[in-house]
Amino acid sequence: MPLSAILRVLVNQLIFANLMHRPVRTLLSMLAIGVEVTMILTLVGVSYGTLDASARRARGIGADVFVRPPGSSAISLSSAPLSEKMVPVLAQEPGVALATGTMVQSMGGFETIQGVDFPAIDKMASTWRKPGDPEKEGFKFTEGTAFQEPDDIIVDEYYARQKKLHPGDHIKLINHDWRVSGIFESGKLARILAPIGTLQRLTGNEGKISAVYLKLTNPKQADAFVAALRGKLNPGDPDHGYQVYTVEDFVSQLSVSNVAMLKDFIYVVIGIATIVGFIVVFMAMYTAVLERTREIGILKAVGAGPTYILNILFRETLMLAILGTVVGIVLTYGTQWLIGHAVPASLVQETVYSWWPIAAAIAIVGAMLGTVVPAMRAVRQDATEALSYE
Amino acid sequence: MSNLDVHGSLEPLPTPVTASTIIEVRQLMKTYRVGEIDVHALNGVDLNVRRGEFLAIIGTSGSGKSTLFNILGGLTPPTSGSVAINGRELHTMSDAERNDLRKRTVGFVFQKYNLLPTLTAEQNIQIVRDVAGRPIAFDERFKEVLEMLGISKRMHHKPRALSGGEQQRVAIARAIVNGPAILLADEPTGNLDTKNSDIVLSLLRDLNKRLGQTILMITHNPEAAAYADRTVQMRDGCVV
Ligand SMILES: Nc1ncnc2c1ncn2[C@@H]1O[C@H](COP(=O)(O)OP(=O)(O)O)[C@@H](O)[C@H]1O
Ligand SMILES: [Mg+2]
């Protein structure tokens, strides 16, 4: 006979009845654990999503190699300390098919505007490596066209949706009035592109660029090309000075574990979430133990030892934590929807399934820790007073 | 679970029948410290109970009757003196052994029925089997006991849907479901009207006569005490 199964049903019945006995407390505990879980999952989802979107956009222009000035970081492409004259020089390098320079101007926060030589960058993006490779296609406009005038900009569909922009609309960015000439399908460079000359002039960076993108005649040689170019640009010390990467290397650096600040931030949020879960469960279980003094006394009077009582309390907590995790996952789809509709250009949130068990484990551990003290109290408290009539 | 449990019978689990004395209490003292004051709840109790005896304990409120029961069941340690149950000294037992004592040897019935409010009558009885690590299904003999207690039709109700008399009968069924050698009933009729009191008291007497159940019953009421074989009186923490 599946004895243990039946016993489990009985104790589950008790746990379920306990949870239903205080529906508001149970719901609030579940909600608090849910918020804990969704804090973690949303932050992780946004981190992964935003970095992945950056990686997609970096790949989307069809370049094989980047050249960037000394001392720049992988994440911020802003500022323009390279000379434009680098572009024709690099274009002459053996193995280079196309070269084009861009400049990136930060608009505060994560928003950037990127200045491009549109015909050159479009050509680079349109040059298919192998037919049908979807990432190697030229710019596509869902509305409008490329730049017609020096003061035109093009924006990607997410930015257009977030700011409700259409071709012909005017928008003020970096103290300049721009006209939107077109909306392009996202996935290439920044979300806002402007003619490089205009951007250089506006920011006092005439003749300066932030990076050079190179397309090679044989992309399989990219690593060798990078090594050779490093040696050439930084004589004597190839690992310092000008930064030369393959796009694939750059993209692989765009992961959460490579962004120390993001990683620390995630740890901090996990810490806060765990403490919140701990406190909520502690209070819920403490009040539960107090108000169940008599029930616990009854169980002791019929011979229940600490194991039996701890088993009930910890299983109740486990149930709360699991239900709370489910609530948290549902809430995370809510935040994803919200971010996708309210700020699709600024943040991208992915569903990171591999973090579901991690978030669940964090919620369960926090809840279990929160149950230790109430459970010790339940085990220690006197049974006889609760059972007497008075 | 252990091999003791497979038969699932109502019989007391094997205990050495060394003597006809099942409870032996010697010079039992219990002092509670309440703030600055010592309350001497028990003041040297001596008591022998024979196996199969139905003993009534009467005494004024505060005379230490409930304290004596709590000590007999191992729920509270005495301050001094000795208690032997089935020939085993309580103070030599570990906590786990005292829990086992309540699982197997001593069953409690209280004045306020003390059923778990969220479980049905049946589950209230089953959970006691579960605590003892025994199968929760009732055997034929126990079903007869439920019949005798007149609650077999009420098994699927929650306590709040039962009358006081029914709740107390469920509590009695719960107390004996593991077949304890000793039943401790602390004012079991204290909350019941005359009719229900009579039912419960007759049942206790039947359990005692038909199943040979040793019963200790605390009561205020001389009529209730009359159901027992013997009555002792407690006053100021002593049996007089
Ligand atoms: N847990 C306790 N703490 C302090 N004093 C107690 C406690 N339990 C009982 N007492 C005291 O011990 C005495 C005996 O109580 P009790 O055994 O309940 O008597 P009875 O059951 O005969 O009414 C009373 O004075 C009571 O106030
Ligand atoms: Mg009493």
Image (spheres, rainbow, N blue to C red):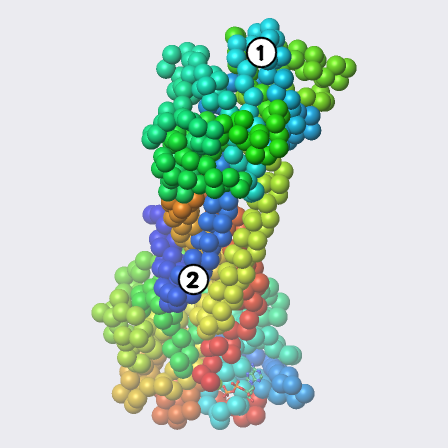
Mark 1 or mark 2: which comes first in sequence? 2
Instruction: Where is residue A214? Give x, y as percent.
Output: 55, 16
* Residue B107 appears in the figure: yes
Q: Is residue A375 visible?
A: no
**Marks 1 and 2 close (CB-CB < 8 Å):** no
Residue placed farthest to the top in the image? A94
Q: Nearer the viewer, residue A68 or B123?
A: A68
| Vertical comparison of B124 with B221: above or below | above
Q: Is residue A263 above or below residue B151?
A: above
The chain carrying label 2 is: A
CA–CA distance in space, label 1 to label 2: 63 Å
Q: Residue at x 34, y 80 (%)?
A: B205
Question: What residue lies at 61% left-to-right and 20% top-to-bottom?
Answer: A84
Q: Which residue is mark 1?
A: A91
Could you tell me which secondary element the residue under label 1 belongs to?
helix
Q: Up-down: is A361 above or below B173? A: above
Please name the amino acid that badge 2 sits on.
Answer: Leu
Quarter of the image for residue B176 reads bottom left
Instruction: Please tell me which residue is depicted at 65% across the width and 86% down the height of the picture.
Output: B35
Q: Secondary structure at mark 2?
A: helix
Instruction: Look at 52% across and 56% down and name the residue there.
Output: A277
**Mark 2 — residue?**
A28
